[in-house]
Amino acid sequence: MTSPFVQKLRHGACLTEEDALLLDQLARPVHVAQAHHDILMEGDPPHTLTLILEGWACRYKQLDDGRRQIIALFLPGDLCEPYGILPHFMDHSLGAITAIRYARIRPDEMRALARANARIEEALWWDMLLQSAMQHEQTVSFGRRLAAERLAHFICELRLRLALVGLADETGFELPLIQSQLADAMGLTAVHINRTLMELRAAGLIELQRKQLTIRDPEALRNLAVFDPVYFHLDQRKDCNG
Amino acid sequence: MTSPFVQKLRHGACLTEEDALLLDQLARPVHVAQAHHDILMEGDPPHTLTLILEGWACRYKQLDDGRRQIIALFLPGDLCEPYGILPHFMDHSLGAITAIRYARIRPDEMRALARANARIEEALWWDMLLQSAMQHEQTVSFGRRLAAERLAHFICELRLRLALVGLADETGFELPLIQSQLADAMGLTAVHINRTLMELRAAGLIELQRKQLTIRDPEALRNLAVFDPVYFHLDQRKDCNG
DNA sequence: AAACGAAATTCACATAGGTTATTGCATCGA
DNA sequence: TCGATGCAATAACCTATGTGAATTTCGTTT
């Protein structure tokens, strides 16, 4: 079984078996965190990068009056910070959504590996390109998409991200977020998430029960979202041949 | 006169005179673009990084029905893409807001320079950290801040960014955006930007006439925005001595 | 100074989404 | 079996922001 980290990075560059091994060796030892617990809090010195191995986590900020915004979701294989630098102090928190397994990686080691291995370096840069492109789409969603479009886009993007690490197929995936977490992730309220979910259900686009999201009509969902996956830059990889 | 690029990067790492020279030599030749013209359009192959030398530019996306979202503003000294990688095809457009002067830099040259010079590498990573932190704040703004808070935050952030390159002081700066551009940048409509601007004026926080933004009450503005500049990570630089 | 066009301002009205509260339904531990 | 508890669903009402016009101001050109 290849790790989700390697599995994801292979979409950005051609990695050999040896490259895969080098990456996986960095990702030790394995740590765990319980659901709803913080891995890092705003103001903490991070010391290491965080790599999610299993489960879901998120980057979030909380305003003084309690308003909370989830800035990014992290799935298996996701690096929670750009690989080359750590801030002295966190300007946001990193929280586990489900129970998670994760690794802590020192950025100087990551940098040394990238410097020594052009394929790995390429893969890591591609990953940053994708992270940043997803941030851009999020700005577009929050700024200009209606709730239903926004939710549809979110589902399409999540499905593709999970598919890259073998955790989703055409028909759906496991979505471990409750509606208030969805709300915090989408810049809406829980009540409105509920309404919008109902709307998508009524339109026959999705189903969602017991944390299992089923996409009933993929094309209609993509159309509503105007989801175009070019921003994943899956064309960046040179052909991997012998 | 040090270039705005070097001037900005000096906030992220200690650069010698020689480092500054190396960076400035990369940034040649100089190109120009007229106000309102696109430098790169969605779908174009970019070939080079874009470095803004003078004037304002922006990253934006346009939806099919005309809705437009400005994703980021680029000021003098700003690199419009992460320095180490270019997508094969742009997933967004890059447009000049004012007339601009800019340089085109090949990412392999940028990477080579960073690899050869640890101070420059550090500075570039800090710049990426800042870019990404600003994106996070934008998500918080769009998701959870009311129009007046959002606008106030935007002004505080812009002022600080411009101050880093000597283009703003405590009292204000030149803001070359018309209200419909402000609207596209903040995920609001021009009418509501107008209302909100009026509100901030009426509260005695700002003035804005003939593209000159004056901050009348900096503290009140910061309070309204709950603006905390820790996310600029201005503490990252090791002390620069002898 | 007149004339023009772009931008700012204002108005009346519409609506997407927020707020607060209630209900029902699982699940779970005692 | 019985409350707790957490979450989904829904309802009634509210408000921040959007929409689609005027109308006014202002900078620029003639």
Image (tube, coloured by chain):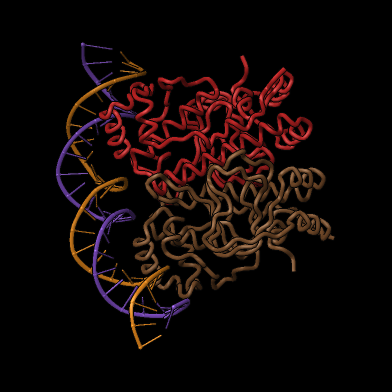
Chain colours: A brown, B red, C purple, D orange
In the figure, is residue B108 to the left or right of B234?
Answer: right
In the figure, is residue A241 to the left or right of B27?
Answer: right
Q: Please, is residue A193 above or below residue B101 in the view?
A: below
* Residue A43: % across, % down: 54, 42
Quadrant hosting residue B205: top left
Residue found at x 74% / y 65%: A2
Q: How many marks?
A: 0
Q: Nearer the viewer, residue B77 or C5?
A: B77
Quadrant hosting residue A116: top right
Residue found at x 63% / y 25%: B10
Q: Nearer the viewer, residue A134 or B11?
A: B11
Q: Nearer the viewer, residue B104 or B129?
A: B129
* Residue A227: % across, % down: 51, 58
Answer yes or no: is residue A203 visible: no
Answer yes or no: is residue A178 visible: yes
Q: Quadrant of the N terminus of chain B?
A: top right
Q: Nearer the viewer, residue B241 or A173?
A: B241
Quadrant hosting residue B199: top left
Q: Quadrant of the C terminus of chain B?
A: top right
* Residue B11: % across, % down: 60, 27
* Residue B124: % across, % down: 66, 33
Q: Please, is residue B103 above or below residue A67 in the view?
A: above
